[in-house]
Image (spheres, rainbow, N blue to C red):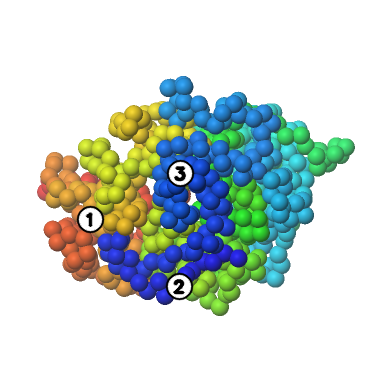
Amino acid sequence: MLSTWAAPTGLLLCLCSLGFHQQWTSSLLVPFSSKHTNLGRIMEVHGPRLLGTSYKDPISSFNLFQKFTAQHPEAYWSILLKELPVVFREPPRCILDITDKSKRGGTWLPGSVLNIAECCLQPSRHPRKDDDSLAVIWRDEGCDSKLHCMTLKELRERVMLVANAVDATFSKGDVIAIDMPMTVHAIIIYFAIILAGCVVVSIADSFAAKEIATRLHVSNAKGIFTQDFILRGGRKFPLYSRVVEAAPHKAIVLPVSGEDVCIKLREQDQSWGDFLASVINLPRPNHYSPVYNPIDFPTNILFSSGTTGEPKAIPWTQLSPIRAANDGWAYVDLQVGDVFCYPTNLGWVAGPIVLYEAFLSGATFALYHGSPLGGGFGKFVQDAGVTILGTIPTMVKAWKSTNCMKGLNWTKIRSFVTAGEASDVDNVLWLSSRAYYKPIIEVCGGTELASSYLQGTLLQPQAFGALSTASMATGVVILNDNGVPYPDDQPCVGEVGLFPLIMGASDRLLNADHDKIYFKGMPMYKGMQLRRHGDIIKRTAGGYFIVQGRADDTMNLGGIKTSSVEIEHACNNVDQSIVESIAISAAPEDGGPELLVMFAVLKEGYSSKPEDLQKKFTRAIQTNLNPLFKVNHVRIVPEIPRTSSNKLLRRVLRDQMKKELSVRSKI
């Protein structure tokens, strides 16, 4: 058994090294138990060989080991490939080839051939995992007394049945979209497409027809899997009709419930039942020989959120799932026997990541077919025996505000994972308390990286709302205004730069210039050109990292650079009427200094005057951030514009305010 919290009372202490008052976790593991984590175990085996006498134990030598892997990423991945169930049809000639200088990220595992979906469906290399092991557990919303289970063998046979149907309907290498909630059927379809040598296009089920059409067009998709409806809170919302409006592509349509779809389909479309019936009479319909492809063959096309123009189409190769799986294996410590639940969608990068984390680590994947915002989801977490629970801060905020998780038994949870946006300290403290103050692992990454570049871990003390380390085999620097990296031990705020040799990260885009977006204009560092990611990161005196927003979220107030996120943290709790506050800076079109503008969303039934909030916001900012800052304008709005992936559209607010300031200047 792993030891988790050394002392829950550590939550009441102040982590002075962060530079401000913030609750923190105590050391998560003692040296003995740390050696039984996935990461601790390989450090014990390989640390003395790689670090020599400098290696002590997984806790005290963690930073040294991480820096070594950043400088020698091929050494880390050679170890990981022996830990994960990645089976090559043809082995790689080497781990990393850097002879081709046109490939800034190097050539990883050259010459290797495999099918990454097959690796997820076999019990090989997991000594405690066999065909009868539980692969997936799920529950339908509204059916709180019933759990459904599927063994690894049952999952594999189901995937192979669908792969046969894909083979009969499409051609090898075809691009096929999935636009549906993340159900057990969605998982089966996802793996079946890849097993059959085709490419998945991930589309979120929340997208409007126009956004669906854009993704189908950019990816050159030949067909799409979807549902007739989406069921949430007992209500049906149309999905197939949006797909029909988007494009004439062939659609295979699953019913949201029951055996048959309850709507009329177009002539070119096919019901799920008819799709499977086309191969049910094969001699062995549940057997399929995987299609093997080179390591750099695309398996999945994902999209950025598209906050500025057309979303970037990012192909994932077979390298990307290996990198994604490392997040769960190394930092979250997913192991055989764990039950991993992370409510998300295949249309977001978290969807494919958590699939590969679970299935390449040997864990059981838990799915809730419904909304994760209510008590029904919480009861599923309890009944399914979830041991690792993934969240996003918005979700946690909803749980806390409605108190819908009260009375549930989450004692089987041994850690939480949170990603997607910056965490609020009060909310994650509340979340940790739901499972007797279990650790919360923060994650920060990106679609084009196929995983994280900053992480929390079980081998370091964790601060709520902060990240404790760069990911293994990932080099991270923080740049000053002149593009010069700050020293590694210096507290600072700046744009992050990444070492370019990142296994599994993107090396091309389908509809944009990859080199221009990720490398052009980035400085050289130790003989290599850094890779752009776009985040503004704060490093504290204690070495923790806090995400301050995107580079375009930075503002210059009176010659002082600050972050929108920092200002919002100071302002969100100044008045009980406020649900959310958003900070932007805008300069008049005819020039002049940037003005600080706050947008506020009020709780239902509350009212506040802009001038009153302006005084409170200014007082909070001057007290907590800088006495020279002041709020110039406050706008009360019904809602904040966001992308489909819930990212703030500050650009829209900024453009609106610039127009208003321009009009004012002409009066």
Q: Residue at x 40, y 72 (%)?
A: 10
Bin the neighbour count of mark 3 within 10 Å (Cα to Cα): few under 14, some 14-19, many 20 and up: some
Indicate whether 462 appears above or below 277. Answer: below
Q: Residue at x 64, y 30 (%)?
A: 91
Indicate whether 185 appears above or below 396. Answer: above
SS assignment at label 1: strand
Task: Give the farthest residue toward the front.
Answer: 53
Name the mark nearer the viewer: 2 or 1.
2
**Residue bearing the label numbered 3:** 51
Q: Amino acid at mark 2?
A: Ala
SS assignment at label 3: helix
Q: Nearer the viewer, residue 92 or 250?
A: 92
Q: Earlier in the sequence, mark 3 or mark 1?
A: 3
Q: Earlier in the sequence, mark 2 or mark 1?
A: 2
The mark found on residue 597 in the picture is 1
Q: Amino acid at mark 1?
A: Val
Can the viewer see residue 403? yes
3D distance between C-alphas at marks 2 and 1? 43 Å
Q: Quadrant of residue 90?
A: top right
Name the mark nearer the viewer: 3 or 2.
3
Q: Nearer the viewer, residue 452 or 616?
A: 452
Can the viewer see residue 381? no
**Residue bearing the label numbered 2:** 7
Q: Residue at x 71, y 54 (%)?
A: 128
SS assignment at label 2: loop
